[in-house]
Amino acid sequence: MRAWGVTYDTGFTNLGTTTHEPFDPGIVADDMRVIHEVLRADAVRITGGVAERLEIAARHAAAAGLEVWYCPFTNDLTVDELLEFLLDAAERAERIRREGANIRFLTGSEISMMTIGLMPGATLTERAAAISREVLPRVQRATNAVLARAAAGARERFGGLIGYASLPMEAVDWTPFDFIATDAGYRDATNAAALPGNLAAMTSQGKPFAVTEFGCAAFTGAADRGSRGAIIGYDEHTAQAVRLTETVERNEAEQAAYVRELLGIFDAGGVDTAFVYTFACRHLPTSDDPERDFDLGSFGIVKVLPEGGRWEPKAAFHALADYGRARKEG
């Protein structure tokens, strides 16, 4: 595997708030140094829906010595608003590239689900509920049409490699892109047997293949759930975490084993780059109250503390630091 790293969320926007509050550039800079110097990661995938935050985080990542994957992750924008956001982001990424950064640009993430007008539904919840075999052909055609426009516009503005963080259901036409990438790198009990074959299918298409998301939460049984390990109940009006939807047992060792094993599988399977999801879930802090310990549902490799932007490493953090050190020393 050429490179590995972690996803870094600068704030996914939903219902007037984001998943990274407050956003402190100084803390972001410290986090990037930790990712490079302690985890010894090669790269970081920077996501979020606030333009200025993406640029700030990308600059700090580049300063820390990381390969930067500049990856807007927007929500509830119209197609025109999305394209405007993406092309502005490409210009920002190009300025950073011209200053000497090793940077790639992705024309969004999971846009079929996140964008108003591609999938039926005015909100993310409505769009998720609208997925069906009947609507998919139309969604796929519309999504690829938008991606073709985004890729062409990005080429005019950005001089480096270009990709897109996809969902399998989108059936992306990868012709306009330099590499193939998917957010669906999660293994669970239902797809574990098929994973080697799926990797072979993706890595045999003549372009480098990246897994832009994989991981699990830190409770017993989370590895068998993969991306389906959602145990957090959110307020429908504020998008804030308000409860655990089930009782689970903290098991950081299971999360650590999962991400370490998947990195080995991706390496053996010919994956070019893989990103653990995620460094931190700032919107899911831990708590001494077991019923409000939202970190149990967090895919973060660090445990976010209730105040001050501080965090503590989880077992997965230490496992990845060992992995990064072994790669550098090997």
Image (tube, rainbow, N blue to C red):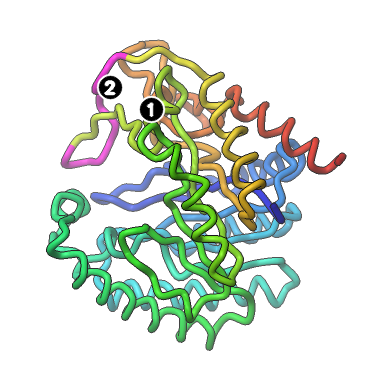
The kind of residue on which mark 1 rests is: Gly
Chief SS of the magenta region: loop
- Quadrant of the frame with the C terminus: top right
Nearer to me, 325 or 97: 325
Q: Position of residue 164 (x, y in %)?
A: 47, 67
Q: Which label sits on residue 206?
A: none
The kind of residue on which mark 2 rests is: Leu
* 42 over 87 or under it: above or below: above
Helix, strand, or loop for circle 2? strand
* 286 over 75 or under it: above or below: above
| Residue 57, quarter of picture | bottom right
Q: Position of residue 87 (x, y in %)?
A: 45, 78
| Residue 301, quarter of picture | top right
Q: Which label sits on residue 244?
A: 2
Q: Which label sits on residue 297?
A: 1
Residue sticking out furthest to the right: 329
